[in-house]
Amino acid sequence: MNHSVVETSMNTKILIPVEEKYKNILTPDALEFAAFLHQTFNSTRLQLLEERKTRQAEINEGHMPNFLTDTEHIRMGDWKIANTPWDLKDRRVEITGPVDRKMIINALNSGVKVFMADFEDSNSPTWENVIEGQINLRDAINKTISFTNERGKFYELNDEIATLMVRPRGWHMEEKHVHVNDQPFSASIFDFALY
């Protein structure tokens, strides 16, 4: 199989050729960080996925979920959470959409309070869509994102834009194009790490 081994301490392999334009996202440092997170959390992720199957079987048998007795002291305790960040206090109007370039620009410019860039349900998770989505988000954060359509119409960010949130792919999904120590990457960890 044609692949490129990226020089990291965790033997990260990208199983397809990497286009030149993707190399500024798929840097050795970025992949090292992603591999570190994968190695740190993947066994827990896999265990939780197995527990989910077990719990679903219990629910199917009529055993409904309830609060754990060993956490009752937390629920009954006197505690508070931190305040909501100012840019997330008003979420009455939001847009969720794929991570393609034009959508990101239009959503951030739309006048809504929050745009959630979605790597899962709104996005077909092809290799190109995932990596180009990361490039698009980087450019949006840096306010350098622009797009010209086939008719020559130019799109760029307004001065006032929505708050950007990102939804990585689900905990159960894998990024089949990248392996670390011969294991497929967790797609959610991969998306999170690159973002």
Image (spheres, helix red, strand yellow):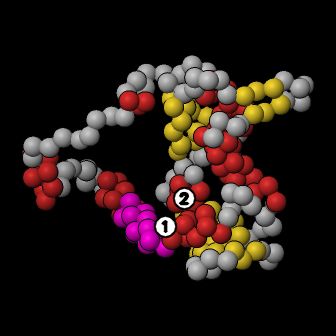
N-term mark: 1 or 2: 1
Q: What stretch is highlighted in magenta?
A: 39-52
Contact (Cβ within 8 Å) of mark 1 with mark 2: yes
Which disc, if any, is residue 193? 2
Instruction: Say whether residue 46 is magenta.
Output: yes
Quarter of the image with the N terminus is: bottom right
Name the kind of residue labelled 1 in the image. Leu
Q: Where is residue 93 in the image (x, y as percent from the top left)?
A: 48, 22
Question: What residue lies at 32% left-to-right and 53% top-to-bottom?
Answer: 59
Marks 1 and 2, how far apart in space?
A: 7 Å
User: Mark 1 sits on what residue?
Assistant: 37
Percent coordinates x, y for residue 14 in the rendering: 71, 70
Q: Is residue 118 on the magenta stretch?
A: no
Residue 19 lies, in percent from the top left, at 81, 60
Residue 41, by quadrant, is bottom left
The part of the image, by quadrant, that contains residue 71 is bottom left
Residue 130 visible here = yes
What's the amino acid at mark 2? Ala
